[in-house]
Image: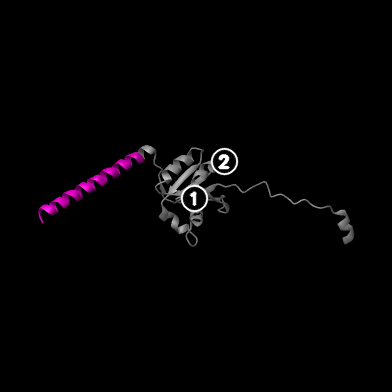
Amino acid sequence: MSHKEFKKISEPMEPQEASPMQPAMHVLGIDMAKHVLHAVGMENTGEIVFRKRLSRHDLMPFMAKLPPVLIGMAACGGAHDWARRLREPGHHVKRMAPPCVKPYVTSKKNDRRDAEAIAEAVTRPTLRLVPIKDVDQHDMQALHRVRERLRGERTALVHAGHGLLHA
C-alpha cells in the first residue's frame, strides 16, 4: 500500500480519552495551616496521584466525596477537631507528632512538601501516633490548664508580696 493510498483510506481519528481507571488513592496526607490546607494523595505503592490546595471550609465537602481512606495529619491544636470530623464519613485518621514527620520532608520546607511527608510517614508501621481526644477530654484538659495558670499567678503574687514586705 502506497503512502497516497493510505491517506485516502485512513479516516480522521478521534482523540482518545484518558483511561477511566484512575489510580486508587489509599493514603491522604493533610498539612494544616491557618487558612488553607494542602492535601496529597498516594496509592499503595507510594506514588503520588493527587495534590490539592483547599480552604478550611472546602475540606469537609471534598472529603465526603472520597471513599474511605487512611488520613495522616500532624498533631497540632486544631487536629483533634479535624480528626473527629474526618472520622464521621468513615475515614481512618492517624495523627503524628511533627518531629516524626520531619525526616520524610524531601527538600526545602513548604506546606505541599509537608503534606507529602505526612502521607509518606503515615504508612510507616513503626510510627508513634498521637491519640485523638474526644470533646470531654479536651474540656478536662482546658480546666487543668486554667487551674495551673491560676496557681502559678497566685504563687507569683505571694512572692511579690513577700518581696515588698521584706525589702
Q: Nearer the viewer, residue 27 or 31?
A: 31
Question: Magenta stretch mostly in which secondary structure?
Answer: helix
- Can you give x and y, in whole percent of width and height, for residue 112 in the image? 51, 55
Q: Amino acid at mark 1?
A: Val
Q: SS for tag 2?
A: helix
- Can you give x and y, in whole percent of width and height, for residue 105 in the image? 48, 58
- Mark 2: few/some/many CA within 10 Å (<14, 14-19, 20+): few
The residue pinned by badge 2 equals 65
The dot on residue 36 is: 1
Q: Nearer the viewer, residue 167 or 59?
A: 167
State which region is magenta: 138-167
On screen, residue 148 versus residue 166, left or right, reads right
- Mark 1: few/some/many CA within 10 Å (<14, 14-19, 20+): some
Q: Amino acid at mark 2?
A: Lys
Mark 1 vs mark 2: in front: 1
Q: Residue at x 29, y 42 (%)?
A: 144
Q: Is residue 133 magenta?
A: no
